[in-house]
């Protein structure tokens, strides 16, 4: 059974930090592939700050094209909003019975994990790979048998930083792939 890591996020916009994390997970853990699951609406984020979901999906596709073990998924576009991880996991497990799904999340999410919908079922049925985040520790959850802390390179880059830089007219070269920068410029994303 192919092991697929699900990297959920708004990817608003996708940046080099996301790509490094996904590449690390696909090549340095037991995972065979990583799927970027673009969330049309994260229940913890304000909708007004999000670019169009199809634009965000397109940017992820551009960023990972020609990469063998990274994929992009719009599965949550067809599920009720807001998107809850458990609903997506159940849907994907039913749709792809030949794949074993795992979660990929940042250490910052471990602090709020107990607030997630059906977290007991997630921890029972799925494994979670955790990448480090600056300023966060893993708390009580780090010893849970369903959680693996990884040595993924520490990333301090955020989509918020990129959006602010774009709004201020600053150069974002090397923070995200050139094709993504061209797409952002062409569409005028994040500049107002």
Image (tube, rainbow, N blue to C red):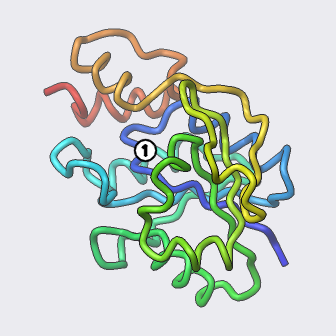
**In the current view of this chain or complex, which residue is farthest to the front?**
140
Quadrant where the C terminus is found in the figure: top left
Image position of 107 (left or right of 178) = right
Picture coordinates of residue 26 (x, y %)?
A: 77, 50
Image quarter for residue 106? top right
**Callout 1: few (<14), some (14-19), or many (20+) C-alpha neighbours within 10 Å?**
many
Secondary structure of residue under mark 1: loop
Picture coordinates of residue 93 (x, y %)?
A: 62, 83
Residue that appears at 50% across and 24% down: 157
Image position of 146 (left or right of 13) = right
**In the current view of this chain or complex, which residue is farthest to the top?**
170
Residue 146 higher or lower than 70, as above or below: below
Picture coordinates of residue 104 (x, y %)?
A: 63, 54
Residue that appears at 52% across and 71% down: 119
Residue that appears at 74% across and 35% down: 152
Picture coordinates of residue 189 (x, y %)?
A: 25, 34
Q: Pointer 1: what residue?
A: 11
Residue 43 higher or lower than 80, as above or below: above
Image position of 119 (left or right of 117) = right
Residue 106 higher or lower than 119, as above or below: above
Q: Nearer the viewer, residue 78 or 136?
A: 136
Q: Nearer the viewer, residue 107 or 159?
A: 107
Image quarter for residue 32? bottom right
Quadrant where the N terminus is found in the figure: bottom right
Q: How many marks do you count on the picture?
A: 1
Residue 183 higher or lower than 76, as above or below: above
Residue that appears at 58% across and 79% down: 121
């Amino acid at each position: 059974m192919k092991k697929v890591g699900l990297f959920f996020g708004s990817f608003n916009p996708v940046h080099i930090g996301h790509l490094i994390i996904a590449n690390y997970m696909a090549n340095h853990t037991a995972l065979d592939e990583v799927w970027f699951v673009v969330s049309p609406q994260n229940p913890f984020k304000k909708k007004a700050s999000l670019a169009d979901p199809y634009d965000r999906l397109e940017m992820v596709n551009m960023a990972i094209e020609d990469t063998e073990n990274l994929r992009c998924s719009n599965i949550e576009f067809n599920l009720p909003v807001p998107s809850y991880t458990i609903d997506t996991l159940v849907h994907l497990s039913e749709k792809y019975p030949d794949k074993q799904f795992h979660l990929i999340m940042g250490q910052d999410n471990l602090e709020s994990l107990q607030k997630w919908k059906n977290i007991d079922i997630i921890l029972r049925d799925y494994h979670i790979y955790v990448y480090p985040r600056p300023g966060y520790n893993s708390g009580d959850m780090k010893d849970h048998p369903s959680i693996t802390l990884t040595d993924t390179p520490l990333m301090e880059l955020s989509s918020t930083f990129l959006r602010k830089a774009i709004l201020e007219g600053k150069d974002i070269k090397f923070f995200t792939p050139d094709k993504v920068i061209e797409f952002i410029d062409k569409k005028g994303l994040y500049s107002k």
